Image (cartoon, rainbow, N blue to C red):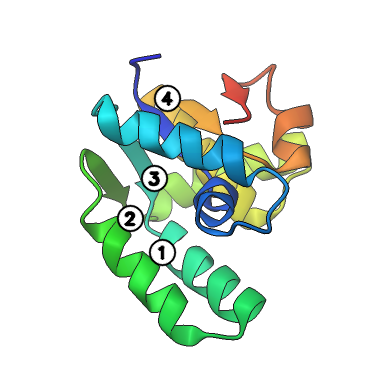
Amino acid sequence: MTSTVTIDASVFVSAFTPTEPAHKASKAFMLHVRDEAIPIIVPIIVLPEISAALSRGQGKPELGLAFVQELHNFPNTTFVDVDTSLANLAVEVAAQNRLRGSDAVYAAVALRFGTELITLDKEQLERLPKVLPVRKP
């Protein structure tokens, strides 16, 4: 795999959290992406999603803040603002595929930029294969 990817927050959180069931696969995937300099395009909402998940899940706000700071320094990463055009695409994807709002934003980014969506989210994995390339790490 050398093409550009969109990575759902679930994968970042799993890679950082040893108690997560998919931790080993997620961590290995993230190391591969870093080592191979695979371009990443993610919606900017990935930052508060990761911060919230780590802060709430572990009860340590400093972990969420520190991880987000590290993500800012992750090589080959582009953060996409959620403007009206992207939001409208996410609205369509959410409605047509019965997805939660933030899940639809990741799908909309993958559609807009022609990337593969990497996720641990069951609904994205089940409902999006007819719309875009999607898989687990």
Residue at image location 55% in from the left, 71% down from the top: 54
Please state which amino acid type lies under the numbered disc 3: Val
Q: In what element is the residue under mark 2?
A: loop
Indicate the quadrant where residue 96 lies. Answer: top right
Along the polypeptide, which appears first: circle 3 or circle 1? 3
Q: Which residue does the numbered mark 1 point to in the structure image?
A: 47
Q: CA distance from mark 2 to mark 1?
A: 11 Å
Q: CA distance from mark 3 to mark 4?
A: 10 Å
Q: Which residue does the numbered mark 2 point to in the structure image?
A: 81
Q: Which percent across, then down, holds residue 69?
A: 28, 68
Residue at image location 55% in from the left, 79% down from the top: 55
Along the polypeptide, which appears first: circle 3 or circle 4? 3
**108 on left or right of 33:** right
Observer-side mark, 2 or 1, equals 1
Please state which amino acid type lies under the numbered disc 1: Leu
Residue at image location 79% in from the left, 29% down from the top: 126
Whether residues under marks 2 and 1 lie with C-beta atoms below 8 angstroms apart, the answer is no
Q: Which residue does the numbered mark 4 point to in the structure image?
A: 115
Along the polypeptide, which appears first: circle 4 or circle 2? 2
Please state which amino acid type lies under the numbered disc 2: Asp
Q: Which residue does the numbered mark 3 point to in the structure image?
A: 42
